[in-house]
């Protein structure tokens, strides 16, 4: 037995209420006789997520029947394996762990309904998958990491609408993709991390806009690029 398996077996076999697992009361108890499940290893009644996952990996067809289970881990793991047409019923699940799994798999026509999910991690996953045409609606999200994700995927023609974002990390992502001449808007950005990206991407003929920049990395990038131009000139 490897060390990871030993560690799993060290975790007590208890259900989500902290009680001993009762195989006789399980709706799938017949599987045990066939080797389809085993307490402490593969069991949907267990409180330990890895044992639940082992069960549904082996029996994905049973996942759809547990999407309303009272234990959030069972719902979340069942959502990972259930048929996708069943997932819209979990869009408003009370637990963010469940909604996160839903956001990773739900069809696009339902994903847009999760753009305003109350949990940032869920919204980040939504922004990673959402169709480009739907992304503009998330540009003003309250969380900077959601907006940063949007900036990585937003159509280039709309990136200029995020140059005034309040967070420097978001503006840096915008600067990495923003085409000219819109990139010029960020040449005098107050954040060093944004101007550093601009210094790397600005056309050589416009590098004078960053001449004498207070940030040593910006100044070094400008000098290096000019030296390379002179060497190849």
Image (cartoon, rainbow, N blue to C red):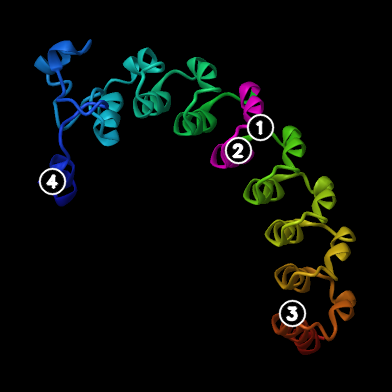
Residue 30 lies within the magenta run:
no
Dominant secondary structure of the residues highlighted in magenta in the image? helix
Q: Measure the C-alpha gap from mark 4 to mark 1.
A: 42 Å
Give the residue at mark 1: 116
Q: Residue at x 72, y 39 (%)?
A: 138
State if disc 4 and disc 2 touch (CB < 8 Å): no
Q: Residue at x 36, y 16 (%)?
A: 66
Query: Between disc 2 and disc 4, whose residue precedes?
Result: 4
Query: Between disc 2 and disc 1, whose residue precedes?
Result: 1
Q: Measure the C-alpha gap from mark 3 to mark 4.
A: 52 Å
Marking on residue 218 = 3
Q: Secondary structure at mark 4?
A: helix
Q: Secondary structure at mark 2?
A: helix
Give the residue at mark 4: 6
Task: Find the magenta span and give its range.
Answer: 109-128
Give the residue at mark 2: 123
Which of discs 2 and 3 lies nearer the camera? The answer is 2
Q: Residue at x 88, y 58 (%)?
A: 182
Q: Measure the C-alpha gap from mark 2 to mark 4.
A: 36 Å
Residue 157 placement (x, y as % from top left)? 84, 46
Which of discs 3 and 1 lies nearer the camera? The answer is 1
Q: Is residue 132 above or below residue 202?
A: above
């Amino acid at each position: 037995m490897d060390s990871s398996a030993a560690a799993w077996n060290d975790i007590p076999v208890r259900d989500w209420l902290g009680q001993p697992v009762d195989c006789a009361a399980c709706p799938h108890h017949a599987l045990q006789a066939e080797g389809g499940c085993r307490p402490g290893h593969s069991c949907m009644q267990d409180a330990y997520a890895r044992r639940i996952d082992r069960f549904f990996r082996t029996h994905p067809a049973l996942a759809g029947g547990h999407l309303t289970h009272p234990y959030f881990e069972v719902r979340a793991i069942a959502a990972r394996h259930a048929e996708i047409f069943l997932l819209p019923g979990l869009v408003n699940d009370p637990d963010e762990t469940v909604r996160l799994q839903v956001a990773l798999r739900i069809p696009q026509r339902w994903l847009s309904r999760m753009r305003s999910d109350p949990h940032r991690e869920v919204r980040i996953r939504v922004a990673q998958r959402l169709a480009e045409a739907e992304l503009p609606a998330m540009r003003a999200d309250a969380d900077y990491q959601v907006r940063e994700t949007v900036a990585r995927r937003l159509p280039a023609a709309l990136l200029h609408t995020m140059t005034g974002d309040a967070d420097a990390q978001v503006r840096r992502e915008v600067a990495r993709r923003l085409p000219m001449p819109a990139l010029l808007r960020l040449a005098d950005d107050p954040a060093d991390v944004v101007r550093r990206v601009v210094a790397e991407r600005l056309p050589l003929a416009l590098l004078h806009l960053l001449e004498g920049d207070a940030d040593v990395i910006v100044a070094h990038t400008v000098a290096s690029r000019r030296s390379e131009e002179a060497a190849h000139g």
